[in-house]
Image (cartoon, coloured by chain):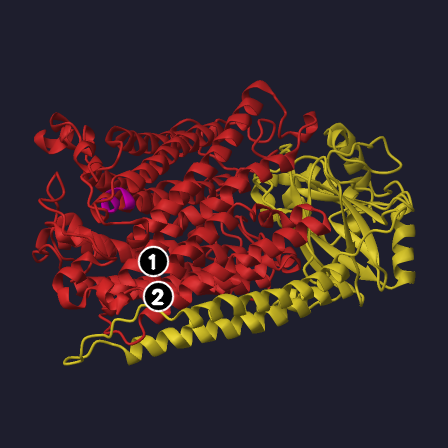
Amino acid sequence: MHLLPTFAPASPQAHALTTLFIGVLIVLGAIFLLVTGLVIFMIVRFRDRPGAPEARQIFGWTALEVAWTLIPFGILAVFSVFMTFADHVADPMVPAGRKPDLEVIGHQWWWEINYPDSGVVAANEVHIPVGKAILIELKSADVIHDFWAPELGRKIDAVPGHPNTLWIEADAPGTYLGTCAEFCGVEHAWMRFRVIAQNEPDFDAWQRAQLAVPSTPSAPDGLAGARLFTDKTCVNCHAVAGTVANQTVGPDLTHIASREMLAGEAAKNTPDELFQWLKDPNAIKPDSHMPDFKLSDDEAHQLVAYLEGLK
Amino acid sequence: MSQIVEAGVAPNLIASERAGLLAWVASVDHKQIGILYIISSMLFFLIGGIEALVIRLQLLAPGLHIISPDTFDQMFTMHGTTMIFLFVMPMLTGFSTYVVPLMIGARDMAFPRLNAMSFWIQLFGGVILYFSFLAGGAPNAGWFSYTPLSEKAYSSLAGVDYWIIGIACIGIGTLAAGINFVVTIICLRVEGLTIRRLPLFVWMTLVNSFLMIGALPLLNAALAILLVDRFFNAHVFDPAGGGSALLWQHYFWAFGHPEVYIMILPAFGIISEVIPVFSRKPIYGYEFVAASTVAIAFLSFTVWAHHMFAVGMSHIANLAFGISSMLIAVPTGVKIFNWTATMYGGRIRFTTAMMFAVAFLITFTIGGLSGVSFAVFPLDWQLTDTYYLVAHFHYVLFGGSVFGIFAGFYYWFPKFSGRMMSERLGAWHFWLTFIGFNLTFFIQHVLGLAGMPRRVFTYPDLPGWAAMNLISSIGAFMLGISVLVFLWAIFDGLANGDEAGDNPWDAWTLEWATTSPPPPENFDRVPPVRGRRPLWDLAHPDRADEKVASA
């Protein structure tokens, strides 16, 4: 990730915002230098010195004051024109009848991502094909969240009862980090996500893989883990295609092994960190809705074996 | 004006005739109530500052577990609520309560008992708010408690309820104070002190009072509805029951944006007194400074939805609120230029008060300019709810309001106490504050541009984030030290300060025409008022302002 993602736009939408920002910053910077220069001039030049004469009593000069009232109007008028242009590029009107490509739903504290055309259900990783303007319909399952991937475009709130739309696009393949930007409760910090932009063939392959039903584990550890997944009531919240697990309270785990991160990016998706997450969720993401099942080490290892097989 | 005579309080209520603590608790004297406001605000400033340091400690490095996430949420909620409602607002109200009657040559406020109620009910609100720590946990939904997060379903503990009741009490006290100031300034001015001759601090208090009267009821209405939602499931702000989550935001910011100006206009007033006195010149363009205040006050009620550019409003609403928000920059810029021009040709004395006022010109300008970058609403879509926003409003509220408060504190301390504060300690306080403040908050602009959202208890170790947070935390602890120096300077001034005399700064407004501190009845005799600077006219009868103006 770039040091300043807001200055590293990777989409036409984000480009419009960055260009506008640079222009505005130059003008604001010039005003700042003017004011600071004037203030410094005054305090250096008119500092009280021994023997200086009494200050001349000046009450103002209307012409000058009218000037510094009117000139800012001109600057703001220019800003208004450019901001209207940027608005049209960064947040174009949605054509009537245009169906969203993606449905993103904010939950405390993870993101559900649905692909209505293909039926893919993902979590915390938004895969998109490059070079296409993708229309997202953004919703919330509980409180207000905010979807923000700064390199790809604007941020927008996920407001319960008030679905929003958002265009994102990526010029080149890559991973773009994003985060929930509206305070949404105790684990707001770990409600991060990533957008993974892929070339069309890779994206299609990813979709096909996501739609495949994972095979039943063959190794004894994995089989035991699959049994635990049902017995330990994981199935009350999570779904795994091809099994009895079909709940949508928590993230869909059908292809959890294909993801890079866990728990809203509080942990990496490695067998070791997954083991710790299952053993003691509170150590990684305190007060999240993932319960601590007091698993034994063996049980946790078996669950890891099962889940890491869900490619 | 004959009202002056009747406006005094009944003699048996003049608190100085009572003894000890009761003299303060039972007081209806505006000077004692002003001091009470200032003392209680200072205490809450210290508490809010400690909360800020806890926040900066937790964010010192990525992945720390010094406090729990829930405690962190309580800290930033209480920090914001405390600094806004229990420090900046009552501190400025305290200055106005003490100084305004003196500046207009009155014996007291128009309604002395209401004045006492204003103070005590807002302190009561603060006590209720802090009692929440003992009652299951402080509020943790942020200082603007967005619904539905602040609804019972997501905040089941009592913290939010204490927040509602506490803030509502403060709202009532502030509203009453606003009414009191308006009546006092309209009715109790000494003869000759026309509206066009009012000291600018009084002008801004007057305009500010209308903001209080207009804005606080919106807040209290919203709080009442939220309370009904929480206790009786009214679902007004709860989408799960058919309510609207965004309605709360409209209510809150319709109050919240005028509130921003409630916290800055009196500071503008202080700057408008301090810069002329220490430049040894009248304010440059009195009419422009006064009129721009009225413009800001009107505009402040038309810009609230710029806090909501990210909620998904229509294009036309975004554009309208973007433009109205940018317009506020015009009257604000006018003030900055007028204050700067006031120094032109002056003989500037760098007292601590003046140093804070000059620093205000620069730091507040940064906050104002970064504010414009939010009014350009497509930029708000990148910047809002990041650390860039945190930096912006601290430049406005700390670099603006708090620097103004410090300037006012050093300026009026001799009047309040009869003693001078040490300029040497004052200089230490100033430089530690100025450097610590910029160290803490300037880097946060960059942190926001690097993508760090606000209100996170920890953060991933992305490029630069750890270093920038460390710098910010170091600055915060420097600020902590500067506050200790400030306290030291206050106690040193009280204990060892030189006698102030009536008018140590050779200033020109009426509060300097009486003893320091003033007697209970304020004045033996109020000097004649024929212009904006009665004490200048008194000292230079041949060059009185009205003669110069007519010449």
* Chain appearing in yellow on the rendered image: A
Q: Which residue lies furthest to the front in this view?
A: B551
Q: Residue at x 34, y 50 (%)?
A: B203
Instruction: Give the vertical position of B30 relative to B357 (above or below).
Output: above
- Residue B471 seen by the camera: no
Spatial distance from mark 2 to mark 1, Cα to Cα? 8 Å
Q: Does label 2 or label 1 sit earlier along the sequence? A: 2
The secondary element bearing badge 1 is classed as helix
Which numbered circle lies on residue B359? 2
Of the residues shown, which amino acid type is indicated by label 2? Ala
Q: Give the range drawn in magenta.
A: B96-100
Q: Mark 1 lies on which chain?
A: B
The answer to whether tags 2 and 1 share a subunit is yes
Q: Name the residue under label 1.
A: B403
Q: Which residue is more in the foreground, A3 or A226? A: A3
Our reading of the magenta stretch's main secondary structure is: helix
Is residue B137 toward the left or the right of residue A170 in the image? left
Q: Residue at x 49, y 35 (%)?
A: B219
Q: Colour of chain B?
A: red
Magenta region includes residue B98: yes
Q: How far across and how far down the image is residue B126, in percent?
A: 36, 34
Q: Residue furthest top?
A: B232
Q: How far across and how far down the image is residue B455, in percent?
A: 53, 48
